[in-house]
Amino acid sequence: MSEFDLIRRYFTRPTPNTNLGVGDDAALMTVSPGMELAVSTDMLVGGTHFYLDTDPRQLGHKTLAVNLSDLAAMGAQPRWATLSLSLPQAHDDWLLAFSEGFFALADAHGVELVGGDTTRGPLNLSVTIMGEVPQGQALRRSGAQVGDDIWVSGVLGEAALGLAQLQDRVQLPEGARQTCLAALQQPQPRVELGLALRGLAHSAIDISDGLLADLKHILDSSDVAAEVRYDRLPKCAYFATSGAGMDMLAQDCVLSGGDGYELCFTAPLARRVEIMALADPLHLPLTRIGQIVSGQGCKLRAADGSVIRIEKEGYDHFA
């Protein structure tokens, strides 16, 4: 199978919302009037971001999901994507499953694949995603203000606990194992939440490298500090039922575990009721975990107000 046969067979589909899609030297798209174009690129490297024997359907889903999560954090509506693949070999069954996982999520969010590239090499997957957001309404990391509530969506620590299971650092019971591996391998990008937060939130980021590491990006960009209550964090249910001896693993997964792709955002107290009202229609827990304060850095506090020492903030490829 040639490179162009591979593209035609697995990655060429009608693109009715695109002026020119796959098949030429570049795609042509028209941004809607009054909109800004939001663009993000993420790469998943085999052996670094995922195990080489990961189910290809789940991998196709995750390859797009991590990019959709970036647009969610900007409050942008996803529109188009390009996909570049480095493949050791072109296996029909693998490509079929991968493309099915990719396009199932693309269809769910109205994303059209408009181009990309393929080459032979170590397994690497790269997506550039494009979306639209009304001019001046994008959620940015730099907008947090003193007095803002700090919120997170969903549950923290499930994906990191799933990774701990794969690394034999913990043995989970069947129910928890399935839940945590699904969170790791098929994350759900919070696109609808991001859209709903336009005009409500002052800042936002998706949690890809760990809550504390990603919250720090907001703090640094906004020149503010934070106080976070550890007892308020929406932790994976397994930690509440597993008994003693799990405190360090729980802290590691909840505070610094990556691959969760929930949203962390800040919003003024005056918007608290409106934000809480989003939870039911989105079928998504939204939890207030702390407050933006003046100064620098993040203090993590226990229920009694004492400061908890932070051992690790999150994942860094080059640390």
Image (spheres, rainbow, N blue to C red):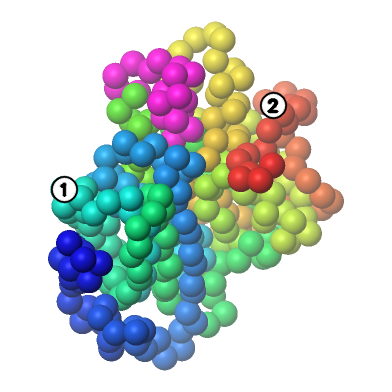
Picture layout, residue 170 above or below residue 281: above
Residue drawn at x 35%, y 71% is 116
- Relative image position of residue 207 (x, y in whole percent): 53, 48
Does 137 sit left or right of 16 as displayed? right
Asked whether 124 falls inside the magenta stretch, the response is: no
- Report the predominant secondary structure element of the magenta stretch: helix
> Which amino acid does the dot numbered 2 rest on?
Ala
Please tell me whether mark 1 sits on a helix, a strand or a loop. helix
- In the image, 221 versus 57, the foreground residue is 57
Using residue 133 as the reference point, say whether residue 52 is left or right of it: left
* Horizontal and vertical percent position of residue 1: 17, 62
Of labels 1 and 2, the one closer to you: 1
- Helix, strand or loop for disc 2: loop
Q: Which residue is mark 1?
A: 93
Q: Residue at 23% across / 60% down in the picture?
A: 103
Pointer 1 and pointer 2: residues touching (CB < 8 Å)? no
Q: Amino acid at mark 1?
A: Asp
Res. 224 image quadrant:
bottom right
Give the residue furthest to the top: 244
Residue behind mark 2: 302
Q: Is residue 269 left or right of residue 227?
A: left
Q: Which residues are magenta?
A: 159-176
Residue at image coords 45%, 40%: 47
40 in relation to 169, above or below: below
Residue 74: x, y in percent? Answer: 51, 66
Q: 95 or 121: nearer the eye?
A: 121
Task: Work out whether 226 lies above or below 109.
Answer: above
Give the spatial CA distance, label 1 vs label 2.
Answer: 50 Å
